Amino acid sequence: MPDISEDSAIFGIITAFPGCNPDFMLGFEAGMVWGQLWSSKNPVKIIVQKANLEGITKLAEHFECRIKVEEHQESDSLVLTLTKTKPERPPDEFEVAQG
């Protein structure tokens, strides 16, 4: 079990989606990463499929993150640590409307 500290978020897909297209799973995984990056000021540490590295790299660039890539014990996975270089995000439309 990975070490979970206050400074990182670790999560993964633990639910099976039988019969799903592999692209669906990559999108699902990328959506989880986007949610973590949007809401967290702390570094986000995640385990992702190697096939998703390019897409998640683009997300990280959008959020202006440094990316640390490490091998994972499962050959088809990687451990990524995404650290925002600008931790404050702009308010979203809902927050502006409430404002």
Image (cartoon, rainbow, N blue to C red):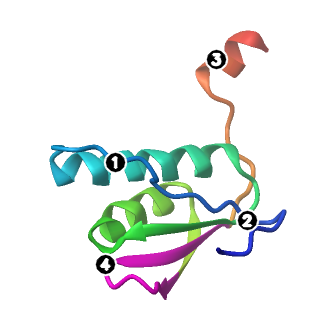
Choose the circle earlier in sequence order: 3 or 1: 1
Q: Which residue is mark 4?
A: 76
Image point (84%, 62%), residue name: 6
Q: Amino acid at mark 2?
A: Ser
Helix, strand or loop for the magenta stretch, by majority: strand
Q: Which residue is mark 1?
A: 16
Q: Give coordinates of residue 98: x percent, y percent.
A: 75, 11
Q: Calculate the distance from the C-alpha at mark 2 to the C-alpha at mark 4.
A: 22 Å
Secondary structure found at label 4: loop
Choose the circle earlier in sequence order: 4 or 1: 1
Q: Amino acid at mark 3?
A: Phe
Q: Amino acid at mark 1?
A: Ala
Q: Give coordinates of residue 62: x percent, y percent.
A: 48, 55
* Above-or-below relation of 72 to 13: below
* Above-or-below relation of 44 to 32: below
Q: Give coordinates of residue 78: x percent, y percent.
A: 43, 78
Q: Amino acid at mark 4?
A: Asp
* Above-or-below relation of 84 to 95: below
Q: Of tags 3 and 1, which is closer to the observer? A: 1
Magenta stretch, residue numbers: 69-84
Choose the circle earlier in sequence order: 1 or 2: 2
Q: Of tags 4 and 1, which is closer to the observer? A: 1
Q: Which residue is mark 3?
A: 94
Q: Which residue is mark 2?
A: 8
